[in-house]
Each structure stands twice: as structure tokens, then as C-alpha cells.
Image (spheres, rainbow, N blue to C red):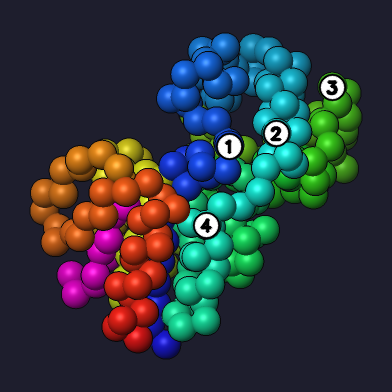
Amino acid sequence: MKKIVALTGAGVSAESGITTFRDSGGMWEQYDVMEVASIDGWRKNPQLMLRFYNDRRKQLEEVVPNAAHRILAELEKDFDVTVVTQNVDNLHERAGSSKILHLHGELTKARSSIDPDLVVDIGYRPIEWGEKAPDGSQLRPHIVWFGEAVPMIGTAADVVATADTVIIIGTSLNVYPAAGLVGYADRKASIYLIDPNEVSCAGRNITMIREKATVGMEKLREILCDNC
């Protein structure tokens, strides 16, 4: 069975109503990114960070996977599919994808402020100030913030290297980590990039599908299944 690795970013979940950094009027616009998405922000004002991610978790509970998520899951009928995502939502899981690697953590989990390996499932509930992890430290969101290492990046690179087909969707080749990960793909691998905007593809033979995620994935499914 041929292997597909999908590198997904914010553009996949945007059509489900998940606001991104760039959305005008979105919840991110109320804050400086470094206040709510950096380890320095956590050290400076952890209560603000907790409120911010509690709001995001509440929003996540109210949205559903879209066609792009569902099509990726459905491709598992014919392919060995691994999703490597920058997103912290659980929409790939809820759509039915079975192999998902979260580069930047998961919104429905919390962890110790001391031990990054001490992770607990919390679902959609808020994390309260003063709520302790099993080791006695303050629980924090299980999110990889600016200023922190991305622990799964090496694993992701290994996965991309095994792919027969790489799909880049919802994130451009100008945005880390997709920009770096695609470089690990085998030279014989087919690479598709789904983006409504023009993206420079210098250095690799990449097939562009200039559509939003849902429409682009429908078109790509037809291409891939014609080659089954």
C-alpha cells in the first residue's frame, strides 16, 4: 500500500471556523502573539494564557471537521496515510484519521509545568489557575509555544522520508515547519500543494492546486484515486 504523508496547517481548520493568527477580528487579534503563544508569555502572565486557551478549547467543542479533514481520513481506504499537523485541534481525529502526529501539541490535553512528558487528557474543560498536575506543578496547556523545542520534528522528518506522496495543505512552503519537512521527501515522491494563493515552489517539482482546502482535497482525491 502506497504511503501518503499530509502536512497540514491552519488553513485546513479555518473552514471549520477555527480562527487563525491572520484572521481579522479573530480572537488572536486581541493579543500580541508573544503574550499568548510563547514560553515568556507563560512566565509573565500564566493566568492570561490559561484564559486564552480555555476560550480556544471552548470554541473547538463547538466546531466540526470539514470536507478536507474527512477526505484525508477516507484516503485510508486505499493508502497508508499519516497526518503531520501544526494544528492543535482534534478535527483530524474526529474526522476519522487514525495516524496523526501533532507537532505543536494538543488543545484537549494539559501537562505539568515542570515535566513535558507528564500529560493528561482534559477534553474541552477549562484549566483552572491553581489546578495541579500529578507532580504538584501548575497544569498548563499541552502546546508547544514560541521559545520551546518542537519535540516531534525529528519523527516527522522520518515519516516524510518514507512517503510516496506528500500533500501540503493549509500551510505554505514559506512557513515553518512545512518548509523544512518537505525537504526530507524522497526525490521520487509526488508532492502536491493546496493553497488558494500563489506559492513559490523553487527547488522541487510540486504540483499546485490553487483552491481552498475543501475544494482542493476533492480535486486531489480524484487525481490520487485515478492512479490507484
**Who comes first in sequence, dot 3 or dot 2?**
2
Nearer mark to the viewer, of 3 and 2: 2
Q: Of residues 215 and 89, which is closer to you in this image?
A: 215
Proximity of marks 1 and 2: CB atoms separated by less than 8 Å:
yes
- Label disc, if present, on residue 17 of the rendered structure: 1
Question: Is residue 184 a member of the stretch shown in magenta?
Answer: no
* Residues rendered magenta in the picture: 185-194
Using the rendered view, name the quadrant where residue 143 is placed: top right
**Who comes first in sequence, dot 1 or dot 2?**
1
Distance, label 1 to label 3, CA atoms, is 28 Å
Proximity of marks 4 and 3: CB atoms separated by less than 8 Å:
no
Depicted 119 relative to depicted 143: above or below = below
Distance, label 3 to label 2, CA atoms, is 20 Å
From the image, tell me which residue sits under label 2.
59
Circle 1 crowding by C-alpha within 10 Å: few under 14, some 14–19, many from 20: some
- Label disc, if present, on residue 129 of the rendered structure: 3
Q: What residue type is labelled 3?
A: Trp
